[in-house]
Amino acid sequence: MKPFLKKALMVGGAVIGVLTLTAVGYGLSLTSAFDASMKQVREIPVPTVNRSTDAAVLARGKHLVESLGACATRDCHGTDLGGGRVLEMGPLGTFTGPNITPAGLAVAYSDGELVRLLQHGVKRDGRSVRFMPVQDFSWLPESDLAAVASYLRTVPPVERPSGVVEVKPLAKILDRRGQLVMDVARHLSETKPELAETPTPTAKYGRFVARLCTGCHGERLSGGPIPGAPPSLPIPANITQHETGLKDWSYQDFEKLLNQGIRKNGQPLNPFMPYEALAKMDDTEKKALWLHLRTVPPLPHGQR
């Protein structure tokens, strides 16, 4: 081997070695920061909540659990709230929504602790909950969250153990980089809280409803692969007004998608899409969401 070629290979190998060590060190620093944050006890006061037995309040709680909260879906807490199906997310980890019936996790929480969990992503012990998409509905006023807590006390108990939750290193890294929310309480503590006003069929209210969509479709709602997700996971669609999205859709097309899980072209949605929760939104929520989506800047598919 010629001397200059040998030297070039040695230099190249050294550079690759340094870059590899740097990448490993960077990853370890982020995973360590994630683990430290998850151990942190957050001093957030438990609100005083008076459990209600009023029929209207319980009906509101049931509606929120089944629609905007998307709690009663297969991939969340299950249709009976006794625990969802196991989600194998490849390099991100394994996630299972726990049993939140009176025979499950909820029994250990006071009403105030449940509301705090739904507001701030903080568990009973003061530490952050993992993966639970509290950011999707933390905009609801405390009266609505109290209605949810009240309703959960009334559902039939389901005797089923909660499944496993395992957050792998890649998910921890993506969380610290702001590409995925796993450390829920930290994420919420870094954003300014904003509560919605009275529900109205307006784009303003629809901006809040659309948070239900951002976990899959991205903050800019243009879809694309979820960071770190395995190839088996469906790629979220573009729901902006771009030609690769909903540009030629009418409200009737959109309503059919929500109610029946059928696209404009007649194709069914992938079961990963929680359209059973979307179908249970009321007319005000559906129209508000549509009007908001009409205002979102059109972006090509994949810009999340």
Image (cartoon, helix red, strand yellow):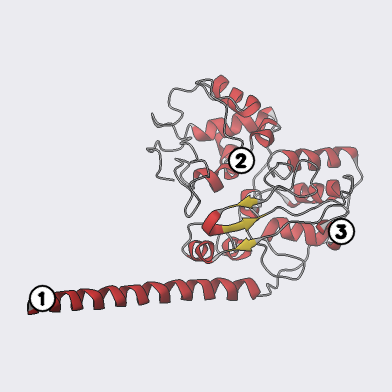
CB atoms at circles 2 and 3 under 8 Å apart?
no
Label 1 CA crowd tier, 10 Å (few <14, some 14–19, many 20+): few
Kindly identify which numbered label has been placed on residue 209: 2
- Is 142 situated above or below 217? below
Q: Position of residue 214 (x, y in %)?
A: 54, 45
Q: Are marks 1 and 2 in contact (CB under 8 Å)?
A: no
- The mark lying in front, picked from 2 and 3, is 3
Rendering quarter of residue 181: bottom right
Q: Is residue 233 visible?
A: yes
Q: Kindly identify the amino acid type of the residue bearing the numbered disc 1.
A: Met
Q: Residue at x 69, y 54 (%)?
A: 96
Q: Earlier in the sequence, mark 1 or mark 2?
A: 1
The foreground one among 65 and 49 is 65
- At 79% from the left and 53% from the top, the residue drawn is 99
> Quadrant location of the C terminus?
top left
Q: Amino acid at mark 3?
A: Val
User: In the rendered view, does 277 fall on the left or right side of 263?
Assistant: right
Which residue is tagged 3? 107
* Residue 201 seen from this side: no
**Horizontal side of residue 239 vs 256, given as left or right:** left
Q: Residue at x 65, y 54 (%)?
A: 134
How far across and how far down the image is residue 132, in percent? Answer: 66, 55
* Tag 3 secondary structure: helix
What label sits on residue 1 in the rendered view?
A: 1
Q: Amino acid at mark 2?
A: Val
